[in-house]
Image: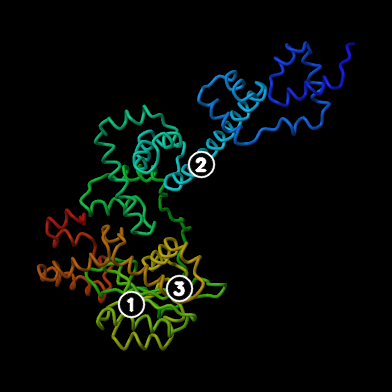
Amino acid sequence: MKNYPLFFKNKMILLYSNSEPVKSICRRYKVSKSTLYRWINMTNSIKMIRKHDKIEEEKVITLLNNGIPIKIISERFKICKSTLYYWQNKQVNNNTIQSNKYANDLHVIKLYRTIEILRFISPVKAMKTREKFEAIRSLSGKYNLSLLCEVFHLSKSTYYRYSNMRIPSNELRDKFLRDEILEIYRINKKRIGGTKIRRSLIERGITVSEKKVYNLMNQLHISKQTKKVNPYLKPRKNTNSKCKNILKQRFNPLEPNLVWVTDVTEIKIRSKPIYLCVIMDLFARKVIGNIVSLKNNTRLAELTFNHALTTRSNKVPVIFHSDRGSIYTSYKFRQLIQKYHITQSFSKPGYPYDNSPMESFFSQFKRESKQSIDSISTIKDYKQLVIEYIAYYNELRFHRGIGLMTPNTKEELYFKYYIKNSKPLKWFARFDFWSGWRESNPHSQLGRLKFYRWTTPAFLTQKYDIT
């Protein structure tokens, strides 16, 4: 093994520290590279000697980025090529880190925008291609088209093909009908089904079948309104001869203020019972009186009756029908009824069919307002709910028993056409009514929809489908 003197080793290290390339040092002094690197590593102060300042490094990196060869830079600045390669690789790694960070930022931005899109429209597997296209087109002005197509799993070529495609007339009509059905369903607070939605569409001048309405409701995921079928009850024997059933389920009087029916229902708020008493005019199934109370007593029935009198401008009915509850059979309430010379009628005991219009009203009220009733915590809120529902019932809700009209509409038609243009027929209806009551003629009827065939103008019959 060849031995080198110490001054020679120091001279080699000094040349290296002066930025002379290792290759030229080894060639000139005939020293192997491994030996020279071993001497360099054995010297602790060599790293401090060889350290380049930051300005020089940045200057060299700028030249490297401008495309100047490493050999020329090494000769000019007397920096070994290994150092230059190290700086170049370090610069590339920094650029890669920055580019990765930029890519991550773009990915985060993309996720945020995707979340914003999903807040507007949530894509589902059942969505048709046309629906996806409409959703993308509605949001294309706000978000990037590529991102929208990726969110809704639709290719750009399909989007452009649909944008240039003419929409079939049946799809345009279905879209129009879906919008109308949703609006009607919202106005009625999700209380009506397909039959009454179709009636509302006809009122708006839109002809459509009931089957079509139900198909579109299924597409919109609107549930069909159904009611629970109650078991049939047999009437009990009449236990009180003074409580006679004069009405006998003849629920179609020929004019207003002939027959009023009433009943009381109960709900519980925080486990406390609340009572609602309602009076209805059977002619148009219109609610004309209602009182909410904490007690189910005679005073509740009297207040409701007085409310109905006020609503009807002190016009009293011929018949006042109710069940055999103690508040209606009490001496005090009977005195009030006799004061106005009203005939009182009672249902058979335990037989709700004799007062089915009122039972039907309470059933509809509880079913259509179930969510609101469940959220009520005070009697004040319950009173407000009753007022709102009765206004909806009289003004907007179509009733099957009166030919799919609203109660207010039927009364308006009566006072507008029947009284002005049909006085003889009105007198005949009166005569038939009185003979039926006073003589107890079993073949007499209080009045049916046949009456409208005689008195209703032709255009009115077509519009409201009375016949």
Q: Which residue is mark 1?
A: 320
Residue 15 image point, x, y percent: 73, 22
Q: Residues within 10 Å of mark 3 (few under 14, many from 20)?
A: few
Earlier-in-chain disc, 1 versus 2: 2
What distance separates the C-alpha of mark 1 from that of mark 3? 30 Å
Are the residues at dot 1 and dot 3 in contact (C-beta closer than 8 Å)? no
> How crowded is the residue under tag 2: few (<14 C-alpha within 10 Å), some, or many (20+)?
few
Residue found 37% across the figure and 42% down from its top: 139
The amino acid type found where label 3 is placed reads Asp
- Element class at badge 2: helix
CA separation, marks 1 and 2?
68 Å
Identified by mark 2, the residue type is Leu
Camera-side residue of 421 and 258: 421
| Identity, as a three-letter code, of the amino acid under mark 1 | Phe
What's the image's color scheme? rainbow
For numbered disc 1, what is the local secondary structure?
Answer: strand
Judged by depth in the image, the label closer to the viewer, 1 or 3, is 3
In which quarter of the view is residue 318 placed? bottom left
Q: Position of residue 177 (x, y in %)?
A: 29, 45
- 1 vs 2, front mark: 2
Which numbered tag is attached to residue 443? none
Residue underneath mark 2? 111
User: Which residue is rendered at x = 36% and y = 27% of the image?
Assistant: 157
In screen coordinates, is 154 left or right of 166? right
- Given the current orientation, which residue lies at the most extreme front position? 7
Residue at the (53%, 40%) spot, across then down:
105
Tag on residue 381?
Answer: 3
